[in-house]
Structures are given as structure tokens and as C-alpha cells.
Amino acid sequence: MKSPKSDSRLLRREDACMTHRPPLGTQGGQLKALPEGRNWGSLEDPPPPRLLNTMFHPSVGTCLVACGALLANSSAQVQLTDVAAASGVADASFGRGAAMADFDQNGLLDLVAINAGQPNQYYRQVAPGAFLESSTLWGLTPDARQHWAGVVADFDNDGDEDVYVATGGFLFAESNQLLRNDLSTVGLMTDISAQSVDGSIMSQVFGATTADFDNDGDLDLFLSTTSSTASCLLLANQGGGVFFNISTGAGITEQDMFLHCSSGDFDNDGWADVAVGSLFNDNLLYRNEGTGGFKDVAGPMGVASTGDNFGMQLEDFDNDGFLDIFLPKYNNFTPATHKSEVFLNDGNSAFLDVSLGMNLTAQTDMGHNTGDIDGDGYPDLYIGTGNPAFKSLDLLYLIQPDGKGGLTANNVSTTSGIQSGGDTRCHGMAFGDFDGDGMMDIFVNNGGPSGDPASAETHYLLKGQPNGSHWASFELEGVRSNRSGVGAHLVATTSAGREVHRRRRAGTGFGNSDSPIQHVGIGADATIERLEIHWPSGITQTLINPSLSQLHQVTETGIQLTAPTFVGGTLELDLTGPSGQVVDLFASVQTFYLALPGLGELALLPPFIPIGSATLDSAGLSSVSLPIPNDPALTGLNAATQALFHDAGSLTNMSLSNGVQVQLQ
């Protein structure tokens, strides 16, 4: 475990252009000295013409002012059409979790149906809109374990998506499964459970989620269990497909019938937390203390909500930058009386129950997930219902702020098309744009108890019909952060001045993993003026005016100060970006924020000078160590540094890093 990061709570700012966004430090790599003849006393040198010509091009944009969240266009309609049969995925199963990801890297999203008591189904999208069940082709051995949840992410940081299958459910302890994606090398999904040590631990698991809980650059696992004699499990990734059970030492000790879980940084302190739903007793909200331990704060923060919880979903419903909570309530008796609940994070120390004003209903909530179905920028709520003994109709609520500190929930269940197949026992649903048309689609996994053959039900593939909402999507590649970018927080500021927040996650709702591509809908707003990506490493990366109706591939890029700066000491910087790129570093005594479309955001006010350079290694990492003169007159000097990243030997594929403020002590 590394030492805790400093507070990374998002700044509430009136002027986003003139407020510095300080980075957070991580450990470094190879050092490179300050170029000969350059020192901190030469800050008045003229700026290099090459950089000036680049940064002050006539196409320069203007600074932006973040005006706070405004209500989006509320006229967007939602229509979802089931295309499962035509697409080749209308198979019947005892469905549990669902997932969507591009396993074979052909540019098309594939689907996974996690099934209880029967083999899981892996659907490869072989051509646009056409899927082929590929379990046998990919070398998977069929088994009849009680598969319950599927977490899809790059656990070994090799650039493709792996699969962790949690098993057991309500019935009994079973071994979990870890599949390494070797499709690009040998054409197989390789079962490495046996070598994963505690990754295949025997347990009665219901839900699973992943995050880099110790901020060491790879993804760990949290498993929620239904055993009254065993706690939930925290599995630390050791690399090489090996996981160790560190639950007890981390303070994960509560025992109960815990159902589904989710992860995310609800207090914005830079450390991923965990939310766990309890069927019979109080929920758990494990706050990551940043020192290797977790503390349950559900009670003090007002979200214990005793009983009937089929999960606990973290989601930013009101786009204020703080994760809120949805509680699916499972009513096992009729008439149902315990309504679904939503709690808004006040950004301080509590969650506020806003359920009453939303007019949510009571039913047998089982399946659940959240995502922006109508493209207006606000996450919506899909609830799958039913019971082992009977079927029921699913629900879809379109969510927006009500302008009074609460939320509105527009029930479009009957008009949206999600109920066109009638009653179901709905569990998993994975969100993503499988056909690339800019609308969110939903892969729904239905089915009842595996011991009842008559309860097997067919999957749905609900295709979203275009409704005029504007959008852009972003595929993230972590470098210093985990390769999947899980935990990254995207903040889009639109031309209307409102912010849209998205977080990259895996393992949410009823054992789901949504598409890794982050879909940012902005409703009727004309453009995305800027997009900030807050990476788990602490790097903040800024894109200016990214094109709409387009998929953007983004590699984590930035610089970080790793040690205090002293007169007579050194300036230590970590550099992160695309492998092999050259990083040119510049300094100035004044900060300045100017939007430069295609490059990023200029953070230095001329005159500025070159102070060093480096070439990123094959992993996309490097460091510089720049000597600071031992001149007492420099004590207290405030300066700033920024980097220009570009291909070796040419000024192509250029981007600007974040700016770093430096105060000499």
C-alpha cells in the first residue's frame, strides 16, 4: 500500500480558467538532468518560437467559465427496440449478471451473459449487429456452477479485457473463476483460476466490483457474500494474475446476507470506496481510509436503510461531482410496501433521502443499473423485477434534478419499449452503444432459479433509437493508472455552462459490467467546450472542444510533482503519456489558462523557457530531476511548469499536459 494521496475533492469554482488544479504525486522512474546552461534564474529568457507558433495559432479558443449545472433539454424521447433475435443473442438461460466489452479488439462490442447453474454465454460481435456465441471457440470449458456476477476489466494491464466470474449466490460456497484474455496471442480465454491463489477462493459470493483500492496501478476485487459465517472479501492484485485475500487486515469483517455491491470514490478523496446492500440488516458503506483500511460509515451518513436491499448502487444522479446512492428494495411479500430509495450526497458528511419527491414505487427490485439512456446528461434508472415464484414488469425512470435540491423521476416503462416482451425475472443489464450510433443500448439477462427449468428466459438486446441528443464518447487507456482506467472521473462542460459527470466503473448493479467506452450525452447543448479526466493516479487531463458524434481514444497524459521543492534542491517530476513520445518541459513565473483546441489548455503566461526534456519508455513513463540553484533570493518564488508531448522527431500528435505550480521553500 502507498501513502495516502492529498485531498482531491473537486474544486467548486466560479472561474474554471483561472483556478489552478494541482496534481497528486506518485512514484517515479528514470531521471534526466536540466539541460546545460538552463537554470531557475533564467525565467526571463524569451519563449521558444516553435512553442509560441504552436500555442498562439489563430484557431486558439477562449477560456471557459463553469457556471454550475443547468437543467438539460427535457424533451428527448426514449424508444428501445428488442433486436436480440435478429442479432443472434435471443437464447434462454437462468440469467444473472451481464457485460459488454470488445474482447477480441475488432472495434465491436461483445456481450456476456452470466448464468446460474449452466455455462455462461460469450457473444462475439462478428459484424455490425451480428453476434456469434463463441464460448467453445474461445476455449471455455462448460460448467454448472452458480455463476452470479461478471466483472470485466484488464486485471493484468496487458491491454485487453479479462473476466472475473463470482459464484455461489444464495445456495452454497463455490470457487470463483478468473479468465485471462489471450485472444490476441493464442485465440483463447485462458482459465488461470488455479494460479490466482485467492482469486479462486471458495466463497458464497453474490456481487462483485473492481477498483484500484490501494492506488498501485492495478485493479483489486471486492466480493459481497451471502454467508452469515463469513465476511465480504477484499482481494488485492499482486500482478501476474495472483490475488491475496486481505479482508480481515483491511477491516472487512461484517457478516450478513449481503447482496450486490458497487465501488466509487463517494467522498472525492482519491481513494475508491465500496457500497454493499444487505437483505436483512443495515447496508455497508465502506470508506477507504487510504492507509490500507476501510471503515463502515453507512449509519453516520444516513444510508443504513435496514433491510430489503438487493444492492447499493453509487451514481451521480444530479451531476454535482459527488456520487449518490440508489437502493433497490426487494419486497418478498405482497402487497409490496418498501419503495425504491435514492439518496443525494450533500458533498460534506451525509446523504439526503429524496425518494419521496421522486414518486418511486414498491415492487420486487432485483436487477438494477444506471446510465444515461436518453442522452440528456443525467443518469437514468433501470429496475428489473420478479421473484423466484413469479414474473413481473421491468421499470425505466428518466432522472433529472427538480431545481429545488431533489430529483424528478419520469416513469417511461410503458412507452419506452422495455416491457414489450412482457413479464420477466430480470437480473443483469449492461449498458453501452453496441452499434455506435450515439444512443445507449441495453443487454438484458433474464431468468429464474436454475432448479426450475421452466424459469429459463430469453435475453433482450434493447437498441436505443436516435432522438436528436448530442453526444461524444471516450475510450480510456490508463498508463500510470490501471490500464482500463477504472475509477477515472470525466467532467464535461457544455456550451450551456453545465457539467456532465461520468465515471469509468466495472462491477455494478446486479453483477454487471457496462461498456468501457464512456458515453457523454449532452442533450440539446451545442458542444462540449472542455472535458477534464481525473485519473486514479491523480493526473488531470484536459481536452478542448472534442468533436461530437465521435469516439475519442484517450491515453493518460500528464506531469506530477513528486517531492517538495527547496532552494538548492531539485524539481522532481513524473511524466506519463503515450509510449515513445518526447516530453518538452517549460516554466514560467505566472499561471494562465487559455483553451487551445486540439492541444489542451495552456497553463503558463509568457515569457516561458524550456527547462528539460525526456522520452517516455515502452510503458509510457519517465521522470526528470531538475536542479534548483542555491540562491536565497529564490526563496518563496512561485513558478509553474507544463509539458508539450509529441512524437519523436516531429511535432505530430501533440498535446499539452496539466500545469504544475511550484513554490520554492
Image (tube, rainbow, N blue to C red):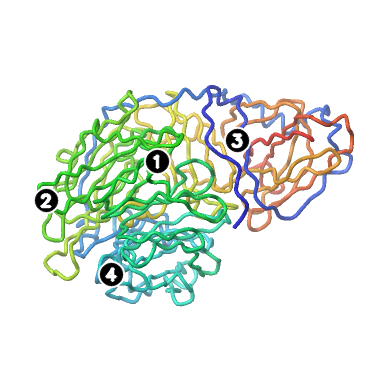
236 vs 28, left or right, is left
Measured as percent of width and height from the top left, residue 302 is found at: 36, 40
Q: Earlier in the sequence, mark 4 or mark 1?
A: 4
Q: Element type at marker 1?
A: loop
The residue that label 4 is drawn on is 146
102 vs 280, left or right, is right
Label 3 to label 1, Cα distance in Å?
A: 42 Å
Say which of marks 2 and 3 sits in front. 2
Label 2 to label 4, Cα distance in Å?
A: 26 Å
Say which of marks 3 and 1 sits in front. 1
The residue that label 2 is drawn on is 422
Instruction: From the viewer's side, name the closer residue of 477 and 274.
Output: 274
Marks 2 and 4 in Cβ contact (< 8 Å): no
The residue that label 3 is drawn on is 599
Q: Amino acid at mark 2?
A: Gly
Measured as percent of width and height from the top left, residue 321 is found at: 45, 35
Q: Element type at marker 3?
A: loop
86 vs 182, left or right, is left
In which quadrant of the rendered image does the C terminus lie?
Answer: top right
Marks 2 and 3 in Cβ contact (< 8 Å): no
The residue that label 1 is drawn on is 301
